[in-house]
Image (cartoon, grey):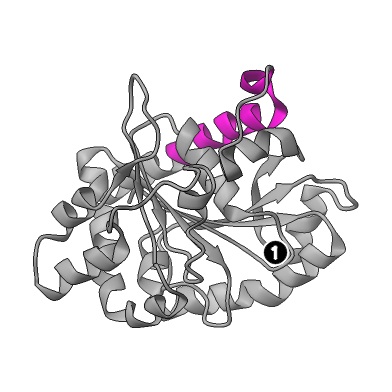
Amino acid sequence: MAVLVLTSCSGSPGVTTLAVGLALTWPRPVLLVDADPGAPQAVLAGYLTGRSAGGKGLLRVAEAHRDRRDLREAVVDQCLTLAETDGDRRLFLPGFTRPGSAGHFAGVWDDLADTFDRLGDVDLDVVVDAGRLGPLGLPPALLERSALTVVLLGSSLRAVLAARVQLPVLAEAQRAGHGARGRTGLVVVDEGHPYRAAEIGRALGVEVVARLPHDPSSAAHFSDGAPQHRKFAAAPLVTALRSTASTFAGVLQQSTALVRS
């Protein structure tokens, strides 16, 4: 198991900012997947500042599935480079081009989620930006193969109440997938306004696995490709993302080892 699924509730900070931030600070080779059913193309329009996907993305993967071609090869072939680094690969799989496209993807998810899972065999972790939780939840097959499913939320009463309403939708999707093998956790942004992370975890009955600071100037780099400011490398958000990415990568690596043993 080498799959991390990220989602959020209504009224919460952008999950795509977290997804890009984790992918860029991940300590191992990583594939970022845009699986937001709303098809906002947020990574292409944001961090990649309007870069064209060149026709690549999930719909081409669906075509490979229809034609019974090897999905692992298809996934890698449809990837763009997220960032040029001296070390680990950082890849990006573009998402849906129209909101209605996700509705026709149901028959693909089981095999595609299994493909994401097996990418761990070639030392490639997968971070999935699943967008905001909707009325239908997330694809059960994806949740079933996720080592860690993370729900992002703020610390306001509005965010906590939205999570209380929407977390049962996530639990229902996990049950539909015959129970997720991994953990579900919360990432709290800007805790203490007004609620502390521990209070939120207790109120929702879900473990808080990370806390992120409110740092708009640094977040703008991940969300919109804004230039890095002078103290970016030591900024609170960047420091927290590095620590969170290391922790989450460890969870995925441990889950993969348990499955193999």
Q: Which residue sits furthest right? A: 194
For residue 157, above or below residue 147 = below
Residue 239 lies within the magenta run:
yes
Which residue is depicted at the point 44% across and 38% down? 249
When asked about the image quadrant of residue 238, the answer is top right
Q: Which residues are magenta?
A: 231-250
Give whichever of 115, 220 is nearer the camera.
Answer: 220
Give whichever of 103, 41 is nearer the camera.
Answer: 41
Secondary structure predominantly adopted by residues drawn in magenta:
helix
Which residue is depicted at the point 61% across and 20% down? 233
For residue 91, above or below residue 57 = above
Residue 140 lies within the magenta run:
no
Q: Of the residues shown, which amino acid type is indicated by label 1?
A: Gly
Residue 92 as seen in the image, left or right of residue 212: left
Residue denoted by label 1: 205
Determine crowd level at label 1: few under 14, some 14-19, many 20+ residues with C-alpha closer than 10 A: few
Expressed as whole percent of the image width and height from the top left, the position of residue 90 reads 36, 36
When asked about the image quadrant of residue 98, the answer is bottom left
For residue 156, above or below residue 158 = above
Expressed as whole percent of the image width and height from the top left, the position of residue 231 reads 69, 18
Element carrying mark 1: loop
Expressed as whole percent of the image width and height from the top left, the position of residue 92 reads 36, 46
Which residue is depicted at the point 65% across and 74% down? 166
Residue 153 as seen in the image, left or right of residue 19: right
